[in-house]
Image (cartoon, rainbow, N blue to C red):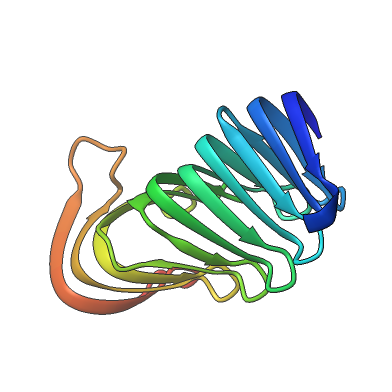
Amino acid sequence: VNSEEIIYLKDKETIISLGLTNAFFDKLYEFKSNKELKIDIIKEEIHALENVEFFDVAKNYRIISDEIYFFKKLEEVITKGKTEAFLDKKYFLKSNNISFFNKTKIIKSKNKAQIIDKKNDSYYQISNFNLSLGDEILKGENISINNDYSKPLNNKLFIKSGIFDLKNKSF
């Protein structure tokens, strides 16, 4: 943990860092926070506030949010507030209050989201979504799809609910 101020509560096995903080957890996960980062050593949980960044070094997943909870045993990231996710250079996601299950490679939220599929040059506006990074399956509701979104003339579709196979470009 590298921080402006660090407090160690020995009786609770908790580390609290205040101010600009950079922390590594098991050499696999990196956290950055502008305000506060709290590590519960016994539970293997992290809670960080204000412009928080979570980075999975092995999988190349970066999540930036107002607030992040990380549960090591479950390999789960919960965000509160505005969230952006950069997922293995394939997908860029913008939403609020997401849940990311690192073991199963699933990211989901009940809120509206914008997802850019860089590989397929597609842009999705979607709500109540579930994106499986392993299977490359996207499920959701109230979907607006813009294929070939980087080109001036492109296809736009509106769908009430759907399941999309991003790997095989089908729905």
Q: In this view, does 95 lie above or below 161?
A: above
Q: Can residue 99 be seen in this view?
A: yes
Image quadrant occupied by the N terminus: top right
Front one among 113 and 17? 17
Q: Is residue 171 visible?
A: no
Name the residue rendered at 81%, 41% in the picture: 8
Front one among 5 and 160? 5
Residue 3's spot in the image, x, y percent? 74, 25
> Left or right: 88 with respect to 156?
right
In which image quadrant can residue 124 be found?
Answer: bottom left
Residue 47's spot in the image, x, y percent? 60, 50
Image quadrant occupied by the C terminus: bottom left
Q: Is residue 7 above or below residue 20?
A: below
Q: How many marks?
A: 0
In which image quadrant can residue 42 be found?
Answer: bottom right
Residue 79's spot in the image, x, y percent? 47, 54
Name the residue rendered at 86%, 53% in the picture: 26
Front one among 147 and 42? 42
Q: Residue furthest front?
A: 11
Name the residue rendered at 72%, 50% in the picture: 39
Q: Which residue lies furthest to the top in this view?
A: 4
> Left or right: 45 with respect to 154?
right
Q: Is residue 100 above or below residue 10?
A: below
Residue 18's spot in the image, x, y percent? 65, 29
> Left or right: 141 with respect to 78?
left
Name the residue rendered at 38%, 57% in the picture: 97
